[in-house]
Each structure stands twice: as C-alpha cells, then as structure tokens.
Image (spheres, rainbow, N blue to C red):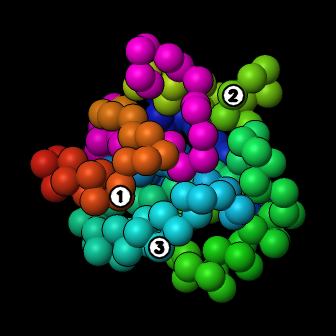
Amino acid sequence: MEMHQFELNSLNGQPINFSKYQGKILVIVNVASKCGFTPQYKDLEDLYAKYKNHGVEVLGFPCNQFGKQEPGSHQEIQEFCELNYGVSFQMFEKIDVNGKNASPLYEFLKKEARGIFGSESIKWNFTKFLVDRSGKVIKRFGSNDSVKKIENEITKIL
C-alpha cells in the first residue's frame, strides 16, 4: 500500500481519495478537542494558511483513544474546530490510531516513521507525520513538538 491509495471519510461523511493529494506535502495529525495540546489547532491552521498555495495540506484525524479527549460527534467536532480555531484544513471522521481497529492509514504511517526507541504505537494526541510530495513519510513529530519545528522541515522540501 502507498500513501495515495487510501480513502477515508471527511467529517461530513464524504469519501476522500488520497490520490487528490499526489504532488502535495502533507501534515497528518491525530487531534482531540479536550486535550492540553488542543491549542495546536491554531498553529496548524496558521501553517496551512501560510503554505496551502505552495502545495501543503494539513489533514486532521480526530481520535478518542487518549484519555477519551475526543468524545464528540462528527458535527460537534467540526463546530468546535471552526468556532474555536477557525480550522479550514481537511478534517476526517473519528478513527483509532492504535489497536486492532486502527485505521490502515495509521498502520502505514506508523510503519514508515517509527517513534522514539523504534516504537510504532502513537503515544498521545497531536502526533504529527510529515509526508513529501511523492507520498514518502519523512518524519514523525510527537505531541510536544511545535508546529514551528514542522514548518522548518517543510521549508527544506518546498
């Protein structure tokens, strides 16, 4: 499987084929509305606004696996993101990132870019993956890694 073969549903239930992201730089992040890292939505939105005309896409994947910090419905998540952070980047339906029900996309990302000590599992909300224009996963960033750190990597591959 490669990056551009995935298809997942947006928050409003519309299937999105990842072939539409061919030639784009992707920042893929598992998000949650009730997390200490939730303010990263603003930084991610700023990053998207700054670089979307340069072929950068931010893809948000709500996940309720860490501290049950994403309990809302798809509509509640969408409203929260728009009202509180003005999120305009693509948001997807809630998924699992670890375990037997993990999204195949996240299984792929975790294999391509392992975490600290070679671990595959996602440790917490707002783990971020950077994917280059060819669909290669370049790097994994932890929850504590600032969006500025990702921006520095993006500018290297633009």
Residue type at mark 2 is Asn
Q: What element carries label 3?
A: helix
Q: Mark 2 points at which residue?
A: 98
Tell me the residue that label 1 is attached to: 147
* Majority secondary structure in the magenta region: loop
| Cα–Cα span, label 1 and label 2 | 23 Å
Task: Give the number of the disc on residue 4.
Answer: none
Mark 3–mark 2 CB contact (< 8 Å): no
Q: Which residue is drawn at 71% across and 62% down?
A: 34
Give the quadrant of residue 138: top left
> In the rendered structure, which disc, 1 or 3, sits on the residue that comes first in sequence?
3
Q: Give the magenta part as a residue range.
A: 115-136
- Asked if residue 39 is positioned above or below residue 100 in the image, the reply reads below
Q: Which amino acid, mark 1?
A: Val
Q: Mark 3 points at which residue?
A: 42
The one of 49 and 115 positioned closer to us in this rendering: 115
